[in-house]
Image: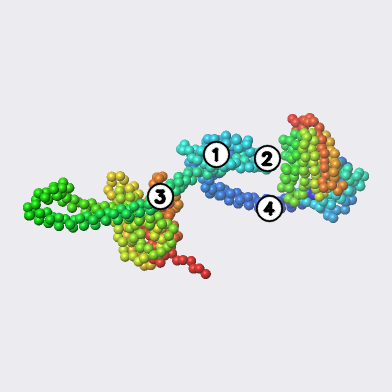
Amino acid sequence: MNDAILLKRLKRAETRAQLLESWLEDKSRELYRSHEQLVLVNRRLSNMVAAMPGFVIAVHADMHITEINSTALQTLGFGEADLIDQPISRIWPHGLDRLMEFCLGEGDIRSVSHRTEEIWLRSDGQAIPVLVSTAVLQPETGMGQMGFLCVGLDLRERRALEIQLRHAQKMESVGQLAAGIAHEINTPLQYLSDNVHFIQDAFDAILEIQPAVEQLKKTCIDAGMREQVGAVIAAEAVADITYLQEQVPLAIHRSLEGIDRVSSIVAAVKTFSRTHQDQGAMDLNGVIQNTLEVARNEYKYVADIESHFGELPMVMGNAGEIGQVVLNLVVNAAHAIADRFGDGGPRGKIHIETSTQGKSVRVAVRDNGNGIPHEIRHRIFDPFFTTKEVGRGTGQGLTIVHSLVVDKHAGSVGFESVPGEGTVFHIDLPIDGKPQAKSR
Amino acid sequence: VKGVIFNIFEQFIVEKWGEEVFEDILAGAHLDSAEPFIGPATYPDEQIMALVVSASQKLQVPPEAATRAFGNFAFHVLAEKFPIFLKGIHDPKTFLLTVDKTIHVEVRKLYSGAVTPMFTYRDTEAQSLVIEYRSPRKLCPLMEGLISGLGEYYQSPIGCHHDRCLHKGDDCCEFHLSFSPRTHSKEEAVL
């Protein structure tokens, strides 16, 4: 090879080295920027995985856990060191079988398993229902190691909510049934009332002729006709007419009182079940009295009601909805009192007070129950939040109170509570009702 | 065309005919730029074609034959540079079936802007395979050379019948390949 060619090739090799060096620098910069972006993305993804309300668990092909997010650790009661490199069966007893079934049964490795409900185990051995979906982890090129990504959702809260919802639906049905029964009772109650009033009037009339009968008997006896009226006097003695004259009016009076009581309950139930009525001027004190009638069974065994009804103007609102608000507060108050004093303990007190506060009216429902613990105060208006056992509370009572007062009536709800001493709820309602949206 | 192909071309000419011949071929191609080719860069298709034409003139062989010989040589160089694509593959047919979905995908990831041909497979019999080749570059002789290099690599000659052809106005080149019954792979031979 001559020198000229050698020189040319050497020069070209030097240029190639310079070009490659320059290219490498460019690529290094690109790589650095890509790395920075990857770090950012990785950080975001890590934060997302950590913040997810569900479990995220990576499992190696040998069925050992390689990654687990904090939600899973907290819910399952483990530390990270307890589970990393441990078999998946430690927390998911059927995990190995399920993952193998999924792997063998799916043709496409990129598919995600159907979501199935599984039982997982906490560190204390408690079994919890978990909704699990699984994806196979495998790089697209077929290189690298295979594994699984399992995403799970703790179903315990959902199960509790479903039970509460079923209970709420049952209570709604019971309410509708009660309204129907109230309607059916009303008519016979009406003629029962009419007939007892008739009997009262008729007996009063009979009593009015009794002095004349006595006078007649006396005249007959004075005229020497004792023998002729003897049968009447004997019959009166047998019938104990004097006793009847005293007791029958009392019995009729008590019957009428009972009928009035039943009538007022039926009327209250009917009023209460009218849920779709529009806003109108309502007698708030009357609505509260009506509600107390309906709720009597809820509190009569545990508490006495004290009420102080202030002078109130007519308030614009939906009487049925406000009745529901007061009912929920009274029922809660009764439960709080029962929780504090228990069976056979002293009776509690529920104090209801109404007053005018400028352009609003205020209803205060105060009880001397067990109060609301500090740690749950921020949650008491949350839907389905309850501290009561299943069947006693649906967790919707105060949510409904808040919704009806704040959303439907543009009012406000507040409360003060001293644990162990009692709670007072304040409901403020604008006298003029919720401002209506102006139509064009 | 990626610079790595130009470099393999240079390596091919230098190994077979020497540096002076390569310099003559390079000079005969009358390329616009005198800059050397670097592997990761991309160069116009016309430049490789100009080099192939110049080589065929210099070596006095038809351009198709030159391209075919280059393809054969290139396979061995590529197999040495990128052994990962052959790892775990013990016969040429299995390898060919990975080209479109694995190797071309990786090439496009590795070399930004790389344009790879498109393969469609018809795999109906164990010892044969039909590949439909589509590429705007119409480098079917290169494909033939690569296939023969593949057969040499696995020490298992591949029968190649190039039927329909882009150069004849067909919509693709059709390679009917027949494989010898498997003997042993290069990896297995080493072991």
Q: 10 Å neighbourhood of mark 3: few (<14), some, or many (≥20)?
A: few
**Residue occupied by mark 2:** A143
Labels 3 and 1 share a subunit = yes
Residue A58 numbered tag: none
Horizontally, residue A36 falls left or right of residue B62, namely: left
**Amino acid bearing label 4:** Arg
**Residue occupied by mark 1:** A84
**Residue occupied by mark 4:** A29
**Amino acid bearing label 3:** Leu
* Badge 2 element: loop
Q: Are marks 2 and 3 in contact (CB under 8 Å)?
A: no
Horizontally, residue B169 falls left or right of residue A38, namely: right
The residue drawn where x is 41% and y is 51% is A176
* Badge 1 element: loop
* Parent chain of label 2: A
Which numbered mark, 3 or 1, is in the foreground of this view?
Answer: 3
Horizontally, residue A300 falls left or right of residue A380, namely: left
Q: If you read the primary sequence from the N terminus, does the residue marked by circle 1 or circle 2 appear first?
A: 1
User: Colour scheme of this structure image?
Assistant: rainbow
Tell me residue A197's x, y (percent).
Answer: 27, 56
Q: Residue furthest right?
A: B60
Tell me the quarter of the picture where residue A223 sits.
Answer: bottom left
Which numbered mark, 2 or 3, is in the foreground of this view?
Answer: 3
Tell me, yes or no, if residue A420 can be seen here: no
**Residue occupied by mark 3:** A177
Report the Cα–Cα distance between label 1 and label 4.
36 Å
* Parent chain of label 1: A
* Badge 4 element: helix
* Parent chain of label 3: A
